[in-house]
Image (spheres, grey):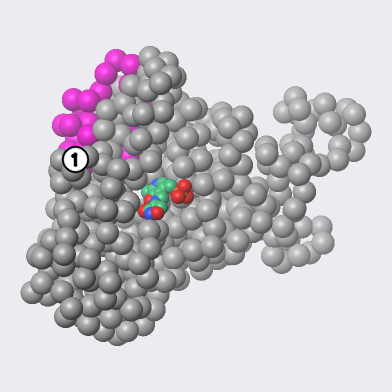
Amino acid sequence: MAQQSGPYTKMVHAGQEPDWTGAVTVPIYQTSTFAFPNAEIGAARFAGQDQGFIYTRLNNPTLQALEECVAALEHGSCAVATASGMGAVSTVYLTLLGQGLHMVGTASCYGPSRVLAEKYLARFGVEASFVDTSDLDQVARALRPNTRLIYVESPSNPAMTVTDLAAVADLAHHHGALLAVDNTFASPYLQQPLNLGADLSLHSVSKFLNGHADVIGGIVITRDPALGVQIRSTMAMLGCNMDPHQAFLVLRGIKTLGLRVERAQANAMAIAQFLENHPKVARVFYVGLPSHPQYQLAKKQMAGPGCVLSFELKGGLEAARKLLNSVRLATLVVSLGGVETLIEHPATMTHASLPREERLAAGITDGLIRLAVGIEDLEDLLADLDQALAHV
Ligand code: LCS
């Protein structure tokens, strides 16, 4: 496969050349460890002078195929698969931060990414400030002499807030810090943070990359190969490696990433327009609508608005509960990025751990509903929402 191939070709082929057996699909190398041909080669592998496999916690051919595929999709030099998205976040934090060092993060990022920094790493002397990273002044004001990492989720959950990645990368680099971007909501199909200046990109592959709600996994991508080696070393020390069977399923999911996102995104656009015109809906947050505050920025840095939206019901908590209990096709569940349409209530579910004041500041009101749109027939999805809204 040529280096300059298009994204659909990469999804199907990158990192997935047939092995010596000719297997068209990368096999599951379900082995914990790899035999060395002789003592000298074994020693050379440990010394980093021979690239052969050693032990699955460090790497494995099925994992390597997935890592090469995602690195190609995001224009990185290196990728490291992890057991979960939180494994990817932990690996990035523990590689770049330490006692006396500081990070700046997106206030409305996935809750545990914030709790990990503010509660757990704080015990080891790491400082963290979480601000609205879509406001560059807030990011600049939060920087300290000891800031080493800016951690941005864009679009971020659930108000779909978009941060100017190229501008934040400049801020980070002028300050001697690195920029890591959680690219989960966009997926590599719609956004390539490294092309915009980020140093690291990461995903919960449990979402769009796998796409079928049957795997938990994560991945970190770097531009600098030396940083990639550090990331792999941290991942291996933490022991948060992905399993070969997980990697096989994610590779299979990636083959249809573009097709799935295109279809779900078209559904999301039509649903966002339907909701924006509905009398019981106060507001819709979807980066594909001109009413979204960062509509123009999203158009500039993303190849499409994506498949997740949220909307606020005029009737508050009671209306939200009624709607959630009335949908028949959309499934009431926390997660996103699958082929099926998923619906949830951020204030009492994904963002329940945030103090009420902070939740409201991030736009997470009691009437807010998050909808992760799938690939079902649009008419069926609209009919389901229409009948559920009639119960509100
Ligand atoms: N980053 C983002 C943006 C996420 O949405 C999630 C999980 C993670 C990281 C962590 O990934 P995991 O360890 O679960 O693979 N988001 C979830 C959500 O919105 N609902 O359920 C999980």
Looking at the image, can residue 121 be seen? yes
**Residue 79 image position (x, y, % from top left):** 55, 43
Residue matched to label 1: 358
Locate the N terminus by quadrant. Answer: bottom right
Q: Residue at coordinates 76% horizontally, 37% vertically from top-left?
A: 54
Nearest the camera: 155 or 195?
Answer: 155
Q: Residue at coordinates 65% horizontally, 49% vertically from top-left?
A: 243
Question: What secondary structure is found at the residue carrying circle 1?
Answer: helix
310 to the left or right of 250: left
Residue 22 placement: quadrant: bottom right
Image: 48 above or below 112: above
Q: Residue at coordinates 31% horizontally, 54% vertically from top-left?
A: 349
Looking at the image, can residue 173 be seen? no
**Residue 371 image position (x, y, % from top left):** 29, 65
Nearest the camera: 13 or 81?
Answer: 81
Nearest the camera: 255 or 373?
Answer: 373
101 to the left or right of 384: right
Q: Magenta segment: does it hold 162? A: no
Q: Magenta segment: does it hold 152? A: yes
